Image (tube, rainbow, N blue to C red):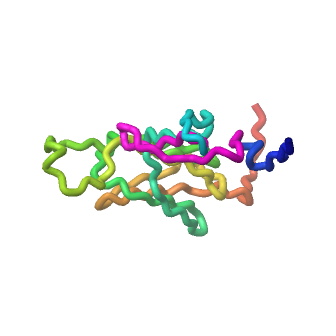
């Protein structure tokens, strides 16, 4: 019998020629992928393929001025105390939680598209910044972070004192 050599993609993913992937809805509205062979047998996809979304990812705008890196994101409906911003010289992480305060029966909804729950975003910054001088403001749901760039060209003369 002739054995066909598996392609690079098939070796990488562990998928055989006779398998196809089927998306299934889980009870938490998180898509999981299971493997279904052409013969109808269903098995679990490899662990690295399962897509579990525990928190949403923020959308951001990042731009620069001559002296600052500016990061903007929408956080409407989030209280300032529910936001956590961590800044390093070359990276920033924004985490938060948007809680739904209404108690409406599911059967009374016609559409339910708003996101409620935790969210985060970690960004590598295009330039080093000074974390101690960062400023965060929120206006009408728009969070703006002003991160001063480190001036690598700045020089300072230090006088030596005799003690």
**Does residue 42 sit above or below 57 in this rendering?**
above
Q: Vertically, is 137 above or below 27? A: below
Tell me the magenta residue range. Answer: 14-37
What's the residue at 85%, 41% (across, down)? 1
Q: Give x and y (percent) for residue 85.
A: 46, 43
User: Depth check: 134 or 113 in front?
Assistant: 113
Q: Is residue 115 a member of the stretch shown in magenta?
A: no
Note whether residue 132 is visible: no
Q: Nearer the viewer, residue 101 or 3?
A: 3
Left/right placement of residue 106 relative to residue 163 reads left
Residue 124 vs residue 155, the one in the foreground: 124
Taking the image as shown, residue 107 lies to the left or right of residue 132, namely: left
Residue in the image at 61% along x and 57% along y: 149
Residue 29 screen position, x and y as percent: 37, 43
Q: Position of residue 161 (x, y in %)?
A: 75, 39
Of residues 69 and 82, the one nearer the viewer is 82
The reply to whether residue 145 is visible in this rendering is: yes
Left or right: where 100 falls relative to 142: left
């Amino acid at each position: 019998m002739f054995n066909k050599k598996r392609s690079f993609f098939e070796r990488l993913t562990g998928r055989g020629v006779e398998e196809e992937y089927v998306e299934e809805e889980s009870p938490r509205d998180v898509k999981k992928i299971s493997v279904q062979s052409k013969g109808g047998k269903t098995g679990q996809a490899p662990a690295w393929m399962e897509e579990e979304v525990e928190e949403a990812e923020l959308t951001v705008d990042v731009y620069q001025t001559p002296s600052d890196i500016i990061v903007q994101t929408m956080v409407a409906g989030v209280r300032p105390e529910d936001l956590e911003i961590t800044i390093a010289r070359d990276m920033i992480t924004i985490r938060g939680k948007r809680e739904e305060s209404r108690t409406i029966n599911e059967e009374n909804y016609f559409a339910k598209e708003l996101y409620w729950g935790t969210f985060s975003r970690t960004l590598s910054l295009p330039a080093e910044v000074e974390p101690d001088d960062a400023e965060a403001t929120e206006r009408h749901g728009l969070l703006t972070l002003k991160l001063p760039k480190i001036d690598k060209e700045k020089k300072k003369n230090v006088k030596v004192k005799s003690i």
